Image (spheres, helix red, strand yellow):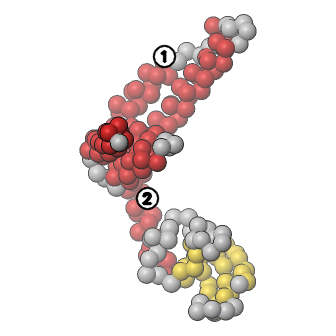
Amino acid sequence: MSRKTWKWAGWETAEITMHDGPAAGVYRVASTSILSPRDIQGVSAIYLGYGGQPYGPVYARIDDLADLVDAARARLAAQDERLAGIKEITDARYALSSARAQTQRELASDCPDASRMPATEPLAARLAELRAAHPVAAAYETAQDWWRSAHDVRATAGHQAMLAIASGDDPAEALRIMDETWSAYCAREATS
């Protein structure tokens, strides 16, 4: 396989020549991070990855991508609208976490000094205020925490809740199902 690349309307564009096999030929294709392999089912596509795995960029014929990219952009815009406030909540949470970590480092030092410990109460109050103002984003953030779990069942439950919330389902219902999934798993493990 050989490849020449250039930029086209903000996408990486390539001319890929497949030298042998059923896909032999020259393809003028484009890659975009908006689309995933699932988005382009049914479109003639080439997946470049490592060891034949389709984890690399997704390439498809330029003519076949325009409608799909427009639909993906509309879907992402709707998701951004539903999750308004997520960046502010994430930033406030990071500020609170950093302040608490700095306080812990200071307390663990040989000569702790209260003047070098940041006040965490205003940061915690700001985070609570943002969560109250943006309940959907707060629910998404909670599901995202679960998704980052090291336990695969908990992480899967969090990921399913994230997808449900991002697609417009009721956040409280998504979190309830997430919690029930974890509780059912824990109950099964306790009895086995």
Which disc, if any, is residue 76? 2
Secondary structure of the residue carrying tag 2 is: helix
Q: In what quadrant of the picture does the C terminus appear?
A: top left
Q: Is 101 placed above or below 19 here?
A: above
Neighbor class of circle 1 (other Cα within 10 Å; few <14, some 14-19, many 20+) is few
Q: Quadrant of residue 61?
A: bottom right
- In depth, the one of 60 and 48 nearer the eye is 48
Q: Secondary structure at mark 1?
A: helix
Q: Quadrant of residue 51?
A: bottom right
Residue under pointer 1: 121
**Type of residue at label 2?**
Leu
Residue type of the residue flagged with mark 1: Glu
Q: Which image quadrant is residue 71 in?
A: bottom left
Visible residue check, residue 84: no
Q: Residues within 10 Å of mark 2 (few under 14, many from 20)?
A: some
From the viewer's side, name the closer residue of 69 and 171.
171
Q: How many marks?
A: 2
Q: Residue at x 61, y 17 (%)?
A: 103
Residue at image coords 51%, 42%: 150
Measured Cα–Cα span from mark 1 to mark 2: 35 Å
